[in-house]
Amino acid sequence: MDYEGQICRAPMERSSFMLPVMVGCSYNQCKFCNLFRHLKYREIPMEQIEAELKRVRELHGKPKKIFLGDGNAFGLKTEKLYEILDLIAYYFPECEGINMDATVTSVLHKSQEELEMLARKKVKHLYLGIESGLDDVLKFMKKDHDLAQAYQAIDRLHEAGLIYDAHIMTGVAGKGRGMENAEALAQFLNRTNPAHVVNFSMFLHKEVPLYQDIRQGTFVPADELETIREEYHLIEIMACRRGCIMGGGQPTRSGDRTKALRAKGLYNADNTTIIKKSDENPLVLELYNGLLKGKEHHLLHNDSY
């Protein structure tokens, strides 16, 4: 199947078979987004979707993961999603998980029974465009939700056994609000516990509505340094919910068996390491006694970050 538009998916989906089920985005109103402005939204017919599944199967493809594109595949009517998932199960019974982008509204429009059925049909990860932890920023950027709705949607996903991944956007709050947005985002992410956080740092295009706000002076973008400081601050204050073995950037949310295996690997690595402590590492000592000498306290306790 020929793909229409720009391919954009989370890096965790790099090895997934990408199956387009729509062209464009059914919402397509976010002020900063340029991915789908030039596309007229339409759903891809079922016969075309099945033909693509059949083509890949006849080429002996056996994908373990499938990503449904494009902008808001979860926004399809539930009955059509069921039909697509049933076709995937028929052509690729070995498939272990089906992931896609979603909006908060598309989650709230589905009943709890529908969410649970989608989970039983192997839907795993939903990528939600959270962007900011500030309600006024979400409203200004014409997101489809406020924070209360996002909390509600994510609670329902967790209850249904679906995994949520957060798309965020440093710089989205504008000049002078980076630290405020970082702290609000950290509070939101710590409360909702996403499996992954993907930062699409703001990149401005002349074709998007936000560019007109900049020209009119109703939005002043943050510079690169403020955006970097915002991301740094966010990482500093985010909580690691699952501890050092299962949290801290580990690639997947897993059960006790995986946790035990990772712990065993860490202990084995520790047993074979000659230097056990960083303050006994000659390279670290050279760094602190040279380049960083006299600067340690300032770097570790700097209020500007």
Image (cartoon, rainbow, N blue to C red):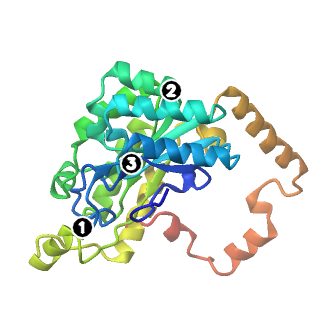
Mark 3 highlights which residue?
A: 186
Q: Secondary structure at mark 2?
A: loop
Which amino acid type corresponds to the residue marked 3 in the rendered image?
Answer: Ala
Mark 2 highlights which residue?
A: 121
Residue 69 in the image, given as x and y percentages of width and height: 43, 50
Which amino acid type corresponds to the residue marked 2 in the rendered image?
Answer: Lys
Q: Residues within 10 Å of mark 3 (few under 14, many from 20)?
A: many
Label whose residue precedes the other's in the sequence (2 or 1): 2
Q: Is residue 257 above or below residue 67?
A: above
Cα–Cα gap, marks 1 and 3 = 17 Å
Residue 108 in the image, given as x and y percentages of width and height: 27, 32
Mark 1 highlights which residue?
A: 174
Q: Nearer the viewer, mark 1 or mark 3?
A: 1
Cα–Cα gap, marks 2 and 1 = 41 Å
Badge count: 3
In the image, 123 versus 91, the foreground residue is 91
